[in-house]
Amino acid sequence: MSFLNHASKHKMLFIRLLRFPKSINSQFAHNYHKRVNNIKWSSKSKVSGGRNPDEETSLYKTQNSRRVSTELQKLAHDDFSSKWDRPARLKPSSEASDKYEIVFGVSPCLLALTQARRKALKLFVKDGEPSHRSSLIRVCEEAHKRQVPIQRVGKKDLDRMSSGRVHQGVCLEATPLSYLTEDSTPSLNSTPLWLVLDGIQDPMNLGAVLRSAYFLGVDRVASSVHNSCPLTPVVSKASAGIMEVMGVYGYKDLENMVRVKASQGWRVVGTVGAEARESSVPVTPCSNLRLTAPTLLLIGGEGDGLSQKLLELCQMLVTIPPGRQLLLGVESLNVSVATGILLHSLLASSRPA
């Protein structure tokens, strides 16, 4: 029994020795912190009006928090006026659906609402968004006029809906846009120009082409539907919303449409690069081309250009001459840039301003 008591005493002593350094360190830290505080804050701050700096910092944070909250409330009130109701902050559904898609960006959302080619289902606006304030207000006003529900959500929700693309604080849930079919709408110009796209697969390029075509006055944009990209929200954003305004006509048999127009007296003009091989069809610089008859301007895809079948239907080929000797690999322009140059050369000198 005495042996056990002796062992217990040694055990307790060992435990105390283990804890002793921690006790010394804790006591040292406490005394050091106390000395530093006494030295640092021995006198009350004159700037704080006699308050301890810790109290001053706490008071500043409280006042600043109240001030920021008031400013944010004011911004929210300015951004989202009482003209429309403020719905609850409901997160959008993350499930994909073929019945709707997400249009993103201020201009695409605004034009999708005003042009009414889509059925708008719900508008999502970034909560407390101070930037682009006037433009966002206009989008919300248009949604309110059309009784489209408005939901305020966080930036992460908008990032997810737009797949990380630039949404400018607004997304619109709406039905998709599709290629239009052939109709009998007459042209307002005596010498109409149709832009015919064959195999444009990059949505950014297609959007830029649509924007140039609308700005420069093209009467119609036609595209093949098999080897071209669909009319997605990315195309709409790249076109600055022009896709919502300017309908794109889709053709399953683009060659047949070109043949029919050629039989009706339309001129078929194809486009080739500056390095194009010799052909039985004459190649002319774009600066020499004039719009003197109804014309189809055929633009090929990013890689191979116009298909051989379409090239055989062309009555004339046009190219953009380079301004210098080109290095191998950079002997051509981006398709959207080339389209803008060709359209400007063809339309600027042929139609009155």
Image: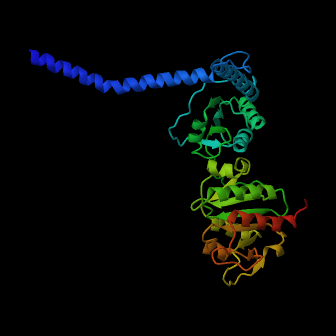
Q: Is residue 5 above or below residue 210?
A: above
Please identify the quarter of the rendering in which residue 315 is found.
Answer: bottom right
Return the x and y of residue 48 as percentages of the image width and height. 72, 19
Return the x and y of residue 295 as percentages of the image width and height. 77, 67
Residue 32 versus residue 72: which sits nearer the camera? 32
Q: Report the number of discs.
A: 0
Please identify the quarter of the rendering in which residue 339 is found.
Answer: bottom right
Q: How is the image coloured?
A: rainbow
x 73%, y 51%: residue: 246
Q: In this view of the protein, can residue 105 be seen by the observer?
A: yes
Question: Residue at the left extreme?
Answer: 1
Return the x and y of residue 36 as percentages of the image width and height. 56, 25
x 56%, y 40%: residue: 160
Q: Quadrant of the C terminus?
A: bottom right
290 lies left or right of 104: right
187 lies left or right of 229: right
Return the x and y of residue 66 as percentages of the image width and height. 69, 20
Question: Residue at the right extreme?
Answer: 352
x 67%, y 78%: residue: 327
Q: Is residue 58 above or below residue 203?
A: above
Residue 132 versus residue 337: which sits nearer the camera? 132
